[in-house]
Image (tube, rainbow, N blue to C red):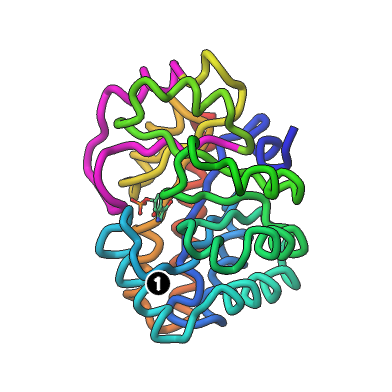
Amino acid sequence: MSKLTEIFQNKKAFIPFLVADDPNAQTTIDNVVTLAENGADIVELGIPFSDPVADGPVIQAADLRAFDAGVNTDVVFEIVENVRQKTDVPIVFLTYLNIVFKYGYEKFCQRCQDLNISGLVIPDLPMEEQGELRPIADQYQIDLIPLISPASGDRIEEIAASASGFIYMVSSLGVTGVRNSFSEQLTKTIERIKQVTQVPVAIGFGIHSPEQAAKLSEISDGIIIGSAVVKMVDETADSTELQSKLANYAQEIKNAITITA
Ligand SMILES: O=P(O)(O)OC[C@@H](O)[C@@H](O)c1c[nH]c2ccccc12
């Protein structure tokens, strides 16, 4: 069983998302450590990309702040290197294929393994096109975490059956960003996934409140929260205040999903 899969044994996982280098390296390092110490089971770290087609305004703005800070893939690896001096929290990268391709698949995966990065979420890499990257990721024990969305239709079973690590269940059509309601279809889709695989399923897209997290964790193995966390980072310039806000929020979410576990 992969390291990522193991995390979901006997508990619902809380997976917050941050954009790396937003608004600077030190803040990201502090944020990851704070989230890890306050309930995050996995941290999803975004490597900014110039054309983030799946991202809504909050994360796009965070990418721009990171670009202003001079982010590139090596800077993100350096951030993780610093994080690793303080915590072993499992980390997965969220990025677009071009970033990995440009860096070089082999070099990228090697660096990930060295820094104990457990998986990659690449929204513009469909299962059918994983042929080149997958063997290299496998070699370095990095899970390629597939996304299943309401638009996956007939492909759901095939995607699920070949998944490792965990499956990213995209709650809603469209781009990242907070939402106030979720389709009833989600339960059925997750049931279909569960028929073909034991790999855990985490839901992301639109979640922000503890109530939503609690409810969605009942039908899944974990929840992913991006925009709500990134917004906090944007709105709180004072670093002590930001760390305490993130700590409180992480605890609140973790408690909400633990009660129902
Ligand atoms: O921001 P939201 O709605 O909470 O969704 C999670 C999300 O931010 C994170 O997982 C993510 C960031 N960028 C993405 C691109 C595609 C899929 C997922 C993502």
136 relative position to 50: left or right: right
Quadrant of res 162:
top right
- List x then y, in percent, for residue 259: 51, 34
Residue in the foreground of this view, choosing between 118 and 211: 118
Question: Which image quarter is the N terminus in?
Answer: top right
| Local secondary structure at mark 1 | helix
Q: Which sits in the foreground, 3 or 154?
A: 154
Identify the amino acid type marked 1. Val
Who's the residue at 41% across and 80% down the image? 67
Please say whether residue 223 is visible from this viewpoint: yes
Residue 217, magenta (yes or no): no
In the rendered image, the quadrant that contains the C terminus is top right
Instruction: Report the span colored magenta.
Output: 166-192
Can residue 39 be seen in this snapshot? no
Q: Name the residue under label 1.
A: 233
Above or below residue 202? Residue 60 is below
Query: Is 42 on the left-hand or right-hand side of 17?
Result: right
Q: Residue at x 43, y 48 (%)?
A: 123
